[in-house]
Image (cartoon, helix red, strand yellow):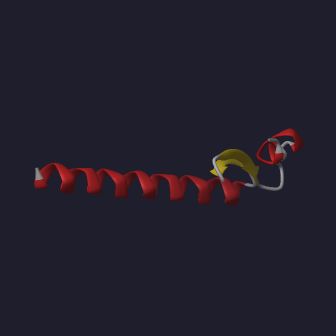
């Protein structure tokens, strides 16, 4: 069982690194990204469409 837990931790670390690297690449390229914040999707970045920026504000 411990091996499964260790494997799951390794997978989680790889996924977190990929996500971090991808968001950094999009930031450098000036592309927007959609992320979860307060259980809602929002768009971050200067070129994010206005309707995506407000999704997180809608009830």
Count of all numbered marks drawn on residues in the image: 0
Q: Nearer the viewer, residue 52 or 23?
A: 52
Query: Would residue 32 be seen by someone viewing this image from the given angle?
Result: no
Query: Would residue 30 be seen by someone viewing this image from the given angle?
Result: yes
Q: Farthest residue to the front: give it.
A: 59
Q: Nearer the viewer, residue 49 or 9?
A: 9
Please indicate whether residue 57 sits to the left or right of residue 23 in the image. Answer: right
Please indicate whether residue 41 sits to the left or right of residue 18 in the image. Answer: right
From the viewer's perspective, is residue 52 above or below residue 16?
above
Q: Nearer the viewer, residue 53 or 28?
A: 53
Please indicate whether residue 24 sits to the left or right of residue 19 in the image. Answer: right
Which residue shows up at 19% across the image and 56% down it?
Answer: 6
Q: Farthest residue to the right: give it.
A: 50
Where the C terminus falls, by quadrant? top right
Which residue shows up at 44% across the image and 56% down it?
Answer: 16
User: x%, y% of residue 29?
Assistant: 70, 54
User: x%, y% of residue 24?
Assistant: 60, 60
Which residue shows up at 20% across the image and 53% down it?
Answer: 5
User: x%, y% of residue 37?
Assistant: 66, 53
Which residue shows up at 68% across the image and 60% down it?
Answer: 28
């Amino acid at each position: 069982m411990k091996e499964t837990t260790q494997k799951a931790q390794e997978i989680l670390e790889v996924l977190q690194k990929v996500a971090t690297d991808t968001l950094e690449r999009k930031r450098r390229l000036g592309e927007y990204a959609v992320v979860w914040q307060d259980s809602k999707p929002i768009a971050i970045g200067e070129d994010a469409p206005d309707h995506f920026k407000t999704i997180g504000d809608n009830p």
